[in-house]
Every structure is written in C-alpha cells, then in structure tokens.
Image (tube, grey):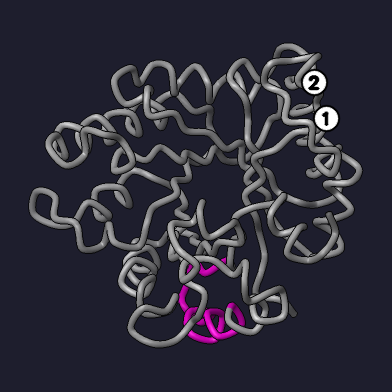
Amino acid sequence: MSALTSMWAWDNPVARTLDARGRDYAPAEPAALVAFCQDRALQRVFLSAPWAADEGPVGDWFGAATTALQTAGIAVGPLGGDPGWLGEPSLAVTWALTALRSGPSDSIQLDVEPWATGGWPTNRDQLCAQWLTLLDGVLAALPAGVSLGVDTPWWLAHEPWESGSLLDAILARVGRVGVVAFSDHAQGPDGIVALAGPAVVAASAAGLPFTVGVETDTAEVAGGAQFTFIDEGPVVLEQETALVADAFGALPGYEGVTVEHHRTWRALLGLD
C-alpha cells in the first residue's frame, strides 16, 4: 500500500478564453481526476476553489469535480489562499462559504502564507495576528459539520508566539493540518521525518488528523532541487514516503502523505 494518500490540485480544465480563471489542464476534467485518484488509491483531494466558485465555467467545473470525487468515495477539501485576505479576513469567509455552496464538503483547506509576503521580515507579529484573526473568522462562519484545515510549514513548531509556538496557536483553531516538509529524502537531519517530527507530534497530541506534505514541482518553484522529488522520480518518491509512514503511521491522527501537486505528480509519473 502506498503512503501517498492525498494531493493538492491547483489546476482546472477550463479554457482561459471561456473564463479568466481557467487553467487549460485537461487531466483535471472530473472523470479524469477521479480516474487518477482511483488509480493511486487516494483518499482526499485538496481541490483549488476559485474566487466566486459558484459562478461561470470554472465554478461549474468545481461543483462537478467535487461531486464526482465524493461520489467515488474520495473526500474533497476546497483549497484556497490569498495573501490579500490577511488584511481583509472577510474575503476569506466569502471565498469559503461560496466554495461550499458550489461543492459541499466536510472541510475547507486554507493555504495562506504570511511568511511569503514582503512584509514578513519587518511585520511578522502583525502578519501572524492577522492570520490568526482570519482563521478565527473562517472557523466561526463555517456550517456545522465542516472542519477547518490549514497547511503549515514544519518550522512553525519552532516559531515563537506568545507562551508557545505559532504552530500551537494554529492547532488550537483548526480541525486538521497539513504539515509541509519539503525534502527529497526521508532520513537524516534535513529529511522529511526530522523536519516534520515536532509538528506532527504536536498535531497528534492535539487530537487532530494530519498529513505530511511533499513536493514534485520543479527545483525553481520548490526553491532548490533538495526540496522536491522532481529529479528522483516516482519510485524514490514511493520509497522515501514509505519511510515517512513507518515513522509516523502509529501516531493517532496520521492520514498519510500529501503530494504537491496533481499536474507535476502526473508529469513525474510520465502521464503528461
């Protein structure tokens, strides 16, 4: 059994000539997306939900893809994040509720990254406070039965905040977490297990379901060849993530490894 149980999927098949939000990626058609997930025995897809996900051709696709996946027994977490939401958290609420209208799901997955903004080096505390306020607002607005998931880099477990870590503050607010630990190997001091370890132990202790995220995009996008499996290939990806499963599989809440992302994973497999 593969350790790879979920993936992020950022692309849609809609032509840009039909909808400015289109990504022209045919393998994201609902039937093709379901087939890929079934072939890989995936349990969950974090599916990019556009702004105004209940409108236009991309909105139609999102609703159809969500329905097709869930009908096939694959859970869907509408996925989104915009740094602009940090200053206007009501926009995140609007996005989330609209995505749920288009494709009802049991969770929402936020990937807002304040550390990726230009203001992080000088305005860290303000950005962190804005991020937590955003999470509080979305959580309060979600319907009953819908959990809030958040993607978090491994190093948040070491980032101080108030009397604990920034990760502690996140874990107190969410219902699930994706621990991003991009590396092209599992073992060693800079391997996935060592990087993700403190964060996944904290998530498990908090009683939350969690996955560990790995990268298959280009070295340029990943920030370096050492952070992605693009050069190692699919066999090494399976081998190394099996070691991740061996390390964390017994922890309560462990739900496997999430792959970043659908398009680049397909390319790694030689399907595109």
Which region of the structure is painted magenta? 241-255
Quick check: 155 left or right of 225?
A: left
Q: Position of residue 114 (x, y in %)?
A: 30, 38
Q: Residues within 10 Å of mark 2 (few under 14, many from 20)?
A: some
Classify 192 as above or below 49. Answer: below
Q: Quadrant of residue 195?
A: bottom left
In the rendered structure, which amino acid carries the disc numbered 1?
Answer: Ala
Classify 193 as above or below 230. Answer: below
Q: Quadrant of residue 177?
A: bottom left
Circle 1 SS class: helix
| Residue occupied by mark 2 | 60
Circle 2 SS class: helix
Kindly give the residue lying farthest to the left in the view shown. 163
Q: Residue at 75% of width from left, 80% of height from top?
A: 1
Taking the magenta stretch, the answer to whether it contains residue 252 is yes
| Residue occupied by mark 1 | 64
Q: Which of 256 and 112 lies nearest the eye of the viewer?
A: 112
